[in-house]
Amino acid sequence: MAGERRLVTAGVVGRPHGLDGSFHVERPADPLAPGTVVWLEGRARTVERRAGTDSRPLVRLAGMAAREDAAAVSGAALLVEQELAEGEWLAEDLVGCEVAGVGTVTRVVAAPSCDVLELDGGALVPLVGDAVRAVDLERRRIEVDRRFLGLDRADAP
């Protein structure tokens, strides 16, 4: 829904760095610039310090002043608010949607090149434009290209 604000994963708290509460961010998906508000274990915190590189950032959050503070949240997701544009949705919103004639989405799996929808019948649908034609969250339905997925033969009548 356009204009809707949702929490999305910006990365995962990695191992502590130094003694001041700083930590590495694993799987960074957001720049996490100083002043950015992140949600960590249900609490809003502000990024006080950002160092490192884009692929291996180091951050320190307000209220975390010791190595033990960072170690205590190791592995926790860092969430940030993002606004969804018209026609955008989060992969997690697709769980429970029906793929006509194929099955129901049971989970979304993060694969190396793209996320993949796992259906209750065991089928896998890559979240790419060639495979997914349309998503209707209101009706909880996903339209796929059956030929692309190998579900319909090209020479069928």
Image (tube, rainbow, N blue to C red):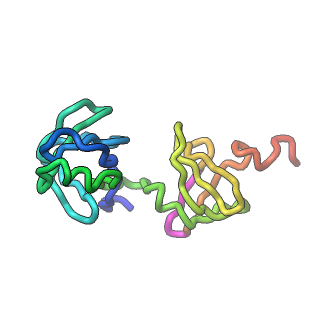
The residue nearer to you, when weighing 148 against 27, is 27
The answer to whether residue 106 is visible is yes
**x and y percentages locating residue 96 in the rendered image:** 56, 67
Residue 66 location in percent, x, y?
14, 50
Instruction: Specify whether 107 is left or right of 91.
Output: right
Report the front residue among 102 and 20. Answer: 20
**Closest to the observer: 124 or 84?**
124
- Residue 157 horizontal/vertical position (percent): 88, 48
Q: Is residue 82 visible?
A: no
Q: Which residues are magenta?
A: 133-139
Residue 134 within the segment the image draws in magenta: yes
Q: Is residue 38 above or below residue 131?
A: below
Residue 148 screen position, x and y as percent? 70, 42
- Relative side of 19 to 92, left or right: left
In the rendered view, tell whether residue 41 sits above or below residue 50.
Answer: below
Q: Quadrant of residue 142?
A: bottom right
Q: Who's the residue at 47% across and 62% down the image?
A: 93
Please give the name of the residue rendered at 11% of the width and 46% of the height, measured from the top-left corner: 48
Taking the spot 26% from the left edge, 51% from the top edge, the residue there is: 71
Identify the image quadrant of the N terminus. bottom left
Residue 89, quarter of picture: bottom left
> Which sits in the foreground, 150 or 33?
33
The structure residue drawn at horizontal position 13% and vertical position 42%, both measured from the top left corner, is 49
User: Toward which corner of the image does residue 119 lie, by quadrant?
Assistant: bottom right
Asked if the magenta segment contains residue 86, the reply would be no
Return the residue found at the far top. Answer: 53
- Extreme residue in the bottom direction: 139
